[in-house]
Image (tube, helix red, strand yellow):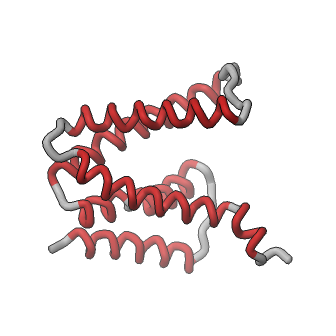
């Protein structure tokens, strides 16, 4: 049966929920960790930890291999990495300056931007109900950010 627990725990929704949980912990841990430290240095420390953990994971599972892929793949992975780095730098700077409970919702406006960019650049189609959800996310993020 498609809706059973085994299907859910191996599918995209399970991993997306885990991602959200870890992202929430990231905001809390980063807000505490960035106190008394330059935000860019804090981003570097976080990046080193990510690189080390991913290297260990890939090595332990036998998936560490040469990244010899088509140039288009490498280009877009490099662009994604650059965007990730820029996002992290901005995020840590925002956490240094503001409350985690206000910074994180604004950061999550990325959900709204992904919907827009997906429609414009990737040709993805969202229904009217989906767009309503996107608008509610945007409105909710703005409401949480205001005092």
- Please state the horizontal and vertical placement of residue 143, each as a whole percent of the image: 26, 75
Whether residue 107 appears in this view of the structure is yes
Quarter of image, res 130: bottom right
In this view, the residue farthest toward the right is 1
Whether residue 79 appears in this view of the structure is no
Q: Quadrant of the C terminus?
A: bottom left
Q: Is 48 situated above or below 110?
A: above
The residue closer to the viewer here, 122 or 15, is 15
Left or right of 36, for residue 127: right
- Please state the horizontal and vertical placement of residue 103, each as a whole percent of the image: 26, 59
Q: Residue at x 40, y 34 (%)?
A: 47
- Please state the horizontal and vertical placement of residue 118, each as a whole percent of the image: 55, 54
The residue closer to the viewer here, 76 or 24, is 24
Q: Residue at x 25, y 34 (%)?
A: 40
Left or right of 85, for residue 117: right
Q: Residue at x 41, y 72 (%)?
A: 137
């Amino acid at each position: 049966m498609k809706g059973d627990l085994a299907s859910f725990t191996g599918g995209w929704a399970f991993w997306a929920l885990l991602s959200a949980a870890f992202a929430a912990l990231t905001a809390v841990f980063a807000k505490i960790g960035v106190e008394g430290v330059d935000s860019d240095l804090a981003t570097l420390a976080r990046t080193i930890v990510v690189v080390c953990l991913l290297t260990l994971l890939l090595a332990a599972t036998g998936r560490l291999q040469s990244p010899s892929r088509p140039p288009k793949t490498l280009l877009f992975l490099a662009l994604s990495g650059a965007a990730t780095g820029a996002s992290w730098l901005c995020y840590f700077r925002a956490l240094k300056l503001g409350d985690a409970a206000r910074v994180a919702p604004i950061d999550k406006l990325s959900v709204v931007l992904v919907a827009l960019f997906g429609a414009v650049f990737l040709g993805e189609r969202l229904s009217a109900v989906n767009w309503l959800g996107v608008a509610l996310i945007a409105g909710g993020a703005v409401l949480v950010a205001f005092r």
